[in-house]
Structures are given as C-alpha cells and as structure tokens.
Image (tube, rainbow, N blue to C red):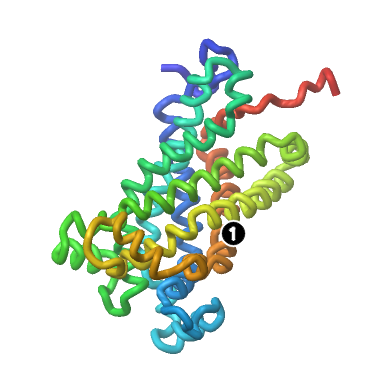
Amino acid sequence: MASSSSASPSGWLPTFTSLDYAKFFSAGALCATATHGAMTPVDVVKTRIQLEPKGSKLNGMATMTRHIIASEGPSGLLAGFGPTAVGYLIQGGAKFAGFEFFKLQGAKLAGSREAAEQYRTAIYVGGSSAAELIATSLLTPLEAARIRLVSTRGYASGLVGAVGRMAKEGGLREFYAGYAPILCKQIPYAIGQFTTMETLSDLQITKDLKAKGHAAEVAVDLGNGVLAGFAAAILSHPADTLLSKINRGGGGSGSAMSKLIVLAKETGPVGIWAGLGTRMLMTGFLIAGQFALYAQIKKAVGAPPGIAIAKAKDSSKA
C-alpha cells in the first residue's frame, strides 16, 4: 500500500491510505463534536426562536435565553446535548474524511492539474455535497432526537430516553421523518462551509499569511472559518427553520416534501429567516473553531495535508 506522502502517477495528486482517512475521520469527529457540543446553548435558543408563533415577543436571543432560564433553569440551555455530541462525532468524521476523499476523486476525474484548477469550484461543490449526503444519513436519527428534546419540554430525560420513545412511537420512520428536509439543510450548509473555506485558502494572501508561523496559521483559519460559517448559515437557514417545525410535528400529514411546502407557506418569506442572526453568530464561531481544530488535530495525529488544487506561487517568477 502506498504511503501517505507518495504521489499518484499524475505527479501532483497524493495517494492517501486507509490509515490517512482514519486520521481525517478522527480529526473531523473531534473538531465537530467539540464545537457543536460547546454551542448547544446557542442552538437551543435558535431552535426555540424558530418555533415561536408569528408576533411572539420571544423572538430575540436575549429574551429567549432569559425565558428558558426562568422557566426551565440553566440546564434548559443544554437540552439535546447528548445527541448533539454523539451525532456530530459521527457526522463530523464522515464529512471531513469524505470531503478529503471526494475532493481527490474530483481532481482525478479532471484529468490534469490545469483542468482541476479551472473547475475547482465544481470539485469543491460536488465533493462537499457527496460527503454531506453520507454524513447526514448517519446524523439524521440523532438530529431528530435532539430537536425533540429541545422543542418539547419534558419529552425525555436524555438521548437514550428520546431514542427509546421515538422508536416505540414511530419506529425507523420516526427517525427519518425529516430526512429530505435535513438534506435540504445540510447539503447547502456543507457547500457553503467547504467551498468558501477552500476558495479562501486558495488565495495567495492566505498562503503568504500562513507562512508567517503557527499563530498566523491559526488566526487565518479562524478568520476564514467565520466567513465560511456565515455562508453556510445563509444558504441553509430556510431549510433549518422548516426542519425544526417538521420535527415538532408540523406540516400535517403526507410526505416530508409536502410538509415542507405547507410549512413554507405557513411561515412566509419573512418568518422563514427567523433566528438567522443568532444562527450566523453560532455557525460563524462553530465553523471557525472546526477548521482551526481540524488543522491542528490532523498535525497531532500525523495526518497528511489535504490535496491543494490551486497552484502555489512560482517563486522563480516573484
């Protein structure tokens, strides 16, 4: 088996081993579960805002936070922490490792470095979409349990209780009731996350700043990650709002897509963006932390760098 440092016959593509992908998975799993777990209180507030009826006075981050603490105590802000931590441990590993894999496959399909560089945005979009499809299929049951715990006070005492109740009441169908909507949310999210980050990383100014040392490298990853988080939040927010409502039982009967249409009409073009500011704040810091942690954990476990499609500056022409 080829080592992680070897190159493919094309001369510029790396050849990753199974161990390399295991390291990518580990780094992605740790960075995702750490950041999503830490942002649980913000996510609870965001979800509750989304579920408020039109005209509610609890439509702000501060007012909703005070309301949750007053009615449920500080522990109310940690509702859904169990499924969040476990779900994103699995989802994060699959997404980051999957993106490394599909990005490499896309570059191979391009046929040459010049073609890969020309179509790199399409490679980023396709790679992030494919990786997220797999990751979301693994995440969906735990995400459904999380939203039930957050949206319905007293639904269950924790992850095991929520999963048991959902299995008893609806079986497998209950866990995947929101599968179509969550794909509509997570795939745009991943596209915004990875395509924005990769595009920013391709910029020569990014490479020059990272070359200034470890502190500069972390700072650049954090800054670029915030922008990637904003893009991910904006692209995925309409579906995120509808997903919260579906998992609470909204949309009536019928298929998930028919429920989406019903809820979209009920929510309206303004209501569908409820909680966007809170979510942008959460997602910006969350994704910034993910990318910074991912880079550092990869180094710690000895993972190779991911494939860089854009050419480095030719120093001989500088």
Residue 265 or 255: which is nearer the viewer? 265
Q: Residue 286, can we see it?
A: no
For the view shown, which residue lies furthest in the front direction? 265
Q: Quadrant of the C terminus?
A: top right
Horizontally, residue 188 falls left or right of residue 220, namely left
Where is residue 90? Give x, y as percent: 37, 48
- Displayed quadrant of residue 141: bottom left
For image coordinates 58% across by 52% down, the residue present is 231
For image coordinates 49% across by 46% down, the residue present is 190
Give above or below for 154 relative to 300: below
The residue where tag 1 is placed is 285
Q: Residue 115, can we see it?
A: yes
For image coordinates 27% across by 74% down, the residue present is 157
Give above or below for 18 relative to 201: above
Residue 84 or 275: which is nearer the viewer? 275
Where is residue 1? Give x, y as percent: 41, 17
Horizontally, residue 39 falls left or right of residue 242, namely right
Residue 165 or 58: which is nearer the viewer? 58
**Residue type at tag 1:** Phe
Tag 1: Cα neighbours inside 10 Å, few (<14), some, or many (≥20)? many
Residue 118 or 261: which is nearer the viewer? 261
For the view shown, which residue lies furthest in the right direction? 318
Give above or below for 25 relative to 171: above
For the view shown, which residue lies furthest in the left direction? 168
For image coordinates 22% across by 59% down, the residue present is 254
For the view shown, which residue lies furthest in the top direction? 9
Query: Which element carries disc 1, helix, strand or loop?
Result: helix
Where is residue 209? Give x, y as percent: 76, 41
Where is residue 158? Give x, y as percent: 29, 69
